[in-house]
């Protein structure tokens, strides 16, 4: 009886520890969004790659209802527009994206969030292919519209690492997104954190301004050879 009691107590304690650990792991990091202005901040980037050069513009603003972000990417034969809405503590509400390739193929995704659940619908033309998924989740999910903002709002410091569940609009699924501070460098006379990230689009390295509004000054994407730099 005593041995059985000890075994039960041991099992209960282990379960409690695991539950505590799981609960701790589920806690998202704190985000700093207080610097986001009411008047839209517009950052314009120039990108270059073997596939062609282009422009990339991000607009960010805050209102009483939360934060909105707009993105426009224009390169040779490819355009992409993204809009996202979120709360001040980075909880996504809804997003929309539209991609046009060679003026022929169009992909449009619409996503809406509710507690513990999101719905994403993607339509690809001219093939009339439709994907409409409802996904459940327990941890914070990073919407694809939040990707340019994530490193700017996290508490970056040497050695810091962050891992999230993120929404992949290419196949309407949840996939890991990771960010890791790998160093510190000065770029265009601006002190920066060097951050390595991996998401559904592959790996990338970001140079994030330490002070001010934590602007992303440079992005390198090794898979495509694309380099994107802020026009100061």
Image: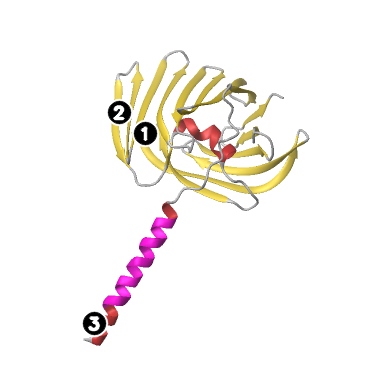
**Image quadrant for the C terminus?**
top right
Give the alpha-carbon distance from disc 3 to disc 2, as whole Å: 52 Å
Residue behind mark 1: 171
Q: First in sequence, mark 1 or 3: give its number.
A: 3
Give the magenta part as a residue range. 8-24
The residue at the point 41 percent across, 17 percent down is 105
Give the alpha-carbon distance from disc 2 to disc 1, as whole Å: 8 Å
Looking at the rendered structure, which numbered label has been put on residue 48? none
Residue 118: give x, y in percent of width and height: 33, 35
Determine crowd level at label 1: few under 14, some 14-19, many 20+ residues with C-alpha closer than 10 A. few
Residue behind mark 3: 4
Residue 52 shows in this picture? no
The residue at the point 66 percent across, 43 percent down is 194
Count of labels shown? 3
Residue 89 shows in this picture? yes
**SS at badge 2:** strand
Q: Are marks 2 and 1 in contact (CB under 8 Å)?
A: yes
The residue at the point 58 percent across, 24 percent down is 51
Looking at the rendered structure, which numbered label has been put on residue 131? 2
């Amino acid at each position: 009886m005593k041995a059985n009691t000890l075994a039960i107590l041991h099992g209960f304690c282990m379960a409690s520890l695991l539950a505590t650990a799981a609960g701790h792991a589920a806690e998202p990091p704190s985000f700093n969004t207080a610097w986001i202005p009411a008047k839209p901040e517009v950052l314009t980037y120039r990108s270059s790659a073997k596939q062609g050069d282009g422009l990339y513009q991000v607009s960010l603003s805050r209102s009483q209802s939360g934060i909105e972000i707009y993105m426009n990417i224009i390169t040779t034969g490819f355009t992409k527009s993204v809009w996202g809405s979120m709360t001040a503590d980075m909880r996504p509400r809804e997003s929309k994206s539209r991609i046009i390739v060679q003026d022929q193929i169009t992909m449009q995704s619409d996503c809406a969030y509710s507690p513990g659940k999101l719905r994403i619908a993607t339509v690809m033309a001219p093939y009339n292919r439709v994907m409409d998924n409802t996904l459940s989740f327990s941890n914070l999910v990073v919407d694809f519209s939040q990707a340019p903002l994530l490193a700017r709002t996290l508490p970056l410091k040497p050695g810091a690492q962050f891992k999230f569940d993120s929404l992949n609009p290419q196949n309407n699924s949840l996939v890991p997104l990771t960010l890791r501070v790998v160093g510190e460098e000065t770029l265009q006379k601006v002190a920066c954190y060097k951050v390595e990230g991996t998401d559904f689009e592959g790996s990338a390295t970001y140079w994030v301004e330490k002070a001010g509004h934590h602007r992303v000054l440079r992005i390198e994407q090794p898979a495509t050879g694309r380099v994107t730099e802020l026009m100061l």
